[in-house]
Amino acid sequence: MGNPWVEVADRCFVRRYTEWDVSVTVIAGDDASLLVDTLATATMGRRLYDEVAELGVPPIGFVANTHLHFDHAWGNAAFAGLPVWAHENVLAGWDAYVQSVRSGVREESEDDPTGELLKTELLLPDHTVTSVALLELGDRHVELVHPGRGHTDGDLVVVVPDADLLCAGDLVEQSGPLSYGADCWPLEWPQTLELVVGLIGDQTVVVPGHGERVDKGFILEQRLDAADIAGQIQQLAGTGVPVDDALAQGSWPMDTGRLGDAVRRGYAQLGG
Ligand SMILES: [Zn+2]
């Protein structure tokens, strides 16, 4: 289920969905619209297609995935025939990620309120970004930027210069703390957020992957948590604390139950 569309900047519409509390964005030009993220299943994607049509904006000409996670990219099949953009690492990691989700989700459990995750038809992105790509929507353009690794190794942010808007994907979260999963890059996340901050101004509207829109000040705050976590991992690993003791010995800015992967991934990257 979704809330109504909200126009958060000139012809930039955000809709927040109950399932996984994920948001999608439509950016309309006078020739075509760009859809940012496609929800979690082909059925949800098809419903989204109809909901975009209700906006009365030019038809979707482009789709972009902010990263490969199911709640952002597994509705792609509903947009077959359209160019679907993502970072090149999304393609590289797609099969392994699909396997990991499908082996972890229990059928007919609360993991999958749609009842469809395990069997939904998938569609890989077919246009890739290495660092930056430009999409022309008519009277405006958007930039797809890979600011570095953080939430995953294939995070993209979407910049709409004339509307002063940035879609941050899950590099920024408002409705919860930063999400460190099995594919995160905790040591690089702070630097990546610094690059994101460099792309925006004090008034820029920032749309996170989950939650209400935020601003540069919010990202700077969240960056402090990311930097704290990265710094502690480096310090603990550097002083010889075993990885299995690190969570207990640190003083973390969020619940340690959310940081197991961050510590494991950070230690692994440091060669520990
Ligand atoms: Zn994610």
Image: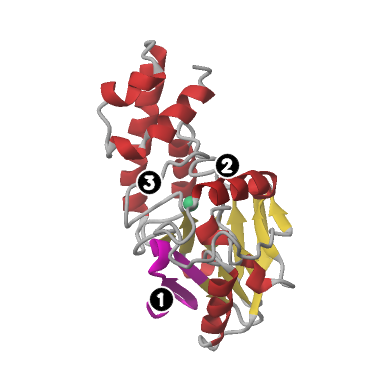
Q: Is residue 270 above or below residue 43?
A: above
Q: CA distance from mark 1 to mark 2?
A: 29 Å
Look at the numbered disc 3 and give the secondary structure of its residue: loop
Task: Please tell me which of labels 3 and 2 falls first in the chain.
Answer: 2
**Spot occupied by residue 53 in the image (x, y as percentages of width and height):** 56, 85
Q: Do the numbered discs 3 and 1 sit on residues whose CB atoms are within 8 Å? A: no
Task: Please tell me which of labels 1 and 2 falls first in the chain.
Answer: 1
Please say whether residue 177 is visible from this viewpoint. yes
- Amino acid type at circle 1 is Gly
Q: Which residues are magenta?
A: 1-25
Q: Which residue is mark 2?
A: 153
**Spot occupied by residue 60 in the image (x, y as percentages of width and height):** 63, 77
Q: Observer-nearest residue: 37 or 30?
A: 37
Q: Which residue is mark 3?
A: 178
Q: Is residue 204 above or below residue 264?
A: below
Task: Please tell me which of labels 3 and 1 falls first in the chain.
Answer: 1
Q: Observer-nearest residue: 83 or 22?
A: 22
Q: CA distance from mark 3 to mark 1?
A: 23 Å
Q: Which residue is mark 1?
A: 2
Q: CA distance from mark 3 to mark 2?
A: 15 Å
- Amino acid type at circle 3 is Leu
Residue 59 appears in which quarter of the rendering? bottom right
Q: Observer-nearest residue: 190 or 84?
A: 84
**Spot occupied by residue 208 in the image (x, y as percentages of width and height):** 42, 58
- Amino acid type at circle 2 is Asp
Q: Which is in the foreground here, disc 3 or disc 1?
A: 1
Q: Is mark 1 within 8 Å of ligand 1?
A: no
